[in-house]
Amino acid sequence: MDSTKENTTDPYTLSASASTPQGHVAEFLLIANDGAFVDTFDFSFVIGSYHFMVWNPDPTAGPGMALDSILSDLGYTGNYATLLPASADLEMYRAIFVCVGIYPSNYVITNTSPEAAAIEDYLTAGGNVYLEGGDVWYYDPLGSGYNFCPLFGISATDDGTSDGGPFVGQNTTFTEEMNFNYAGENSFIDHISPTGTGFLIFRDGDQMYDCGVANDANAGYKTVGLSFELGGLIDASGPSTREALLDSIMHFFGITTGIDELTKLDARALTMQVAPNPFSNLIKISFSIGHSAESIELKIYDATGRLIKSLDPVPSTENHASSVFWNGTDGRGRRLPAGVYFVTLNTETQSETQKIILVE
């Protein structure tokens, strides 16, 4: 290919009937003509792709089943499986959650397995993967286990012992102010630290080793890796709940409920900034839209996806910056408890979401 052409001012719009089955793969043949030149291109896209799939080969199925249940209760759509679908079928999911368990009741994804190849292919194609397991990071790769660490921005440092928990979230990340006790399986909890584009999201609170890493890879995908079972965490007061944690992971992956998947047909930039964050009394939400918008919605949600308040932004003309302030109250003017919230800006063609933290 020696040239490219973009049509951002008048893009093609592809639509599907509301009766189209969710996850249906639509195949297209594009014929390009330019004088005597004619060429054809095949492409496909998934209509109504699912938010997630939980693959749970863990012989102790409870923690993985809990993930599936919590994600569904939060309003995300997905499927649960004990066998990983083929690579071609994974593209209908925007995120894959993999639960391989804790020794001795754990599943090993081997070097030569089709599962390892499918997950790697899914990531390199731009997918999002969550992977939890006590031995998957350090011990398994010493033998026949596939080494996921480079893909996840992780440096595995030790095999660990039976001392997992409490698990403490890290400042300036989506786990800030989270603190969990642990009742999951608890043996040989791998010690894992961030490397490259990875960043730390959880540490053991008394033994002080790293045990959770998120990664915003330059290759265009995102990952979360834990050496404990999220389903084994014990809920406390907000934001230290499994619901808040899983919803924060989904937002980190760029996945939210109730947002049209075709929100980026207009390629012109939409930007939003929030400051200060965290905040206690007043937060300024500033935004700029790269086109004139007839409809602008600015809404605050809690960590479970419940609408808290609708704000009234000033209509924005093309490339004009606007702002609105929020004082941490709900639609009835009541002060909200400290915790994690999300502000979502929607126009006719675009959407942007930012995490905000309200403190006492």
Image (cartoon, rainbow, N blue to C red):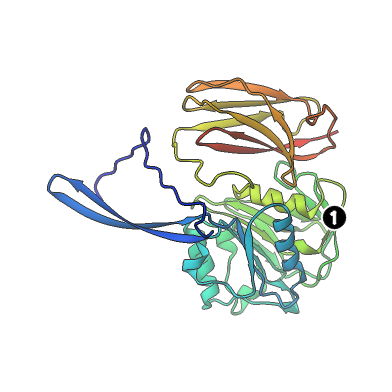
Q: Position of residue 344 (x, y in %)?
A: 64, 36
Direction from residue 131 to residue 242 in the image, left or right = right
Tell me: 327 left or right of 115.
right
Q: Nearer the viewer, residue 214 or 19?
A: 19
Residue 255, percent across and down?
60, 49
- Say above or below: 5 vs 48: above
Residue 208 vertical position relative to residue 291 in the rendered view, above or below: below
What amino acid does circle 1 point to? Asp
**Rendering coords of residue 158 (x, y %):** 71, 67
Question: Residue visible at 51% across and 69% down?
Answer: 118
Q: Mark 1 packing: few (<14 Cα in 10 Å), some, or many (20+)? A: some
Q: Against 297, is 6 above or below?
A: below
Q: Using the rendered view, name the quadrant where residue 39 is placed.
A: bottom left
Q: How many marks?
A: 1
The answer to which quarter of the image holds residue 62 is bottom right
Q: Quadrant of the C terminus?
A: top right
Q: Quadrant of residue 308?
A: top right
Q: Is residue 30 visible?
A: yes
* Residue occupying the point 74% across, 55% down: 73
Camera sees residue 97: no
Please, what secondary structure does the residue beneath circle 1 have? loop
Taking the image as shown, residue 12 lies to the left or right of residue 86, namely left
Residue designated by label 1: 235
For the point 61% across and 59% down, the residue is 52
Which residue is depicted at the point 34% across and 37% down? 7
Between 253 and 204, the one nearer to me in the picture: 253
Residue 41 is situated, as x and y percent measured from the top left of the image, at: 29, 56
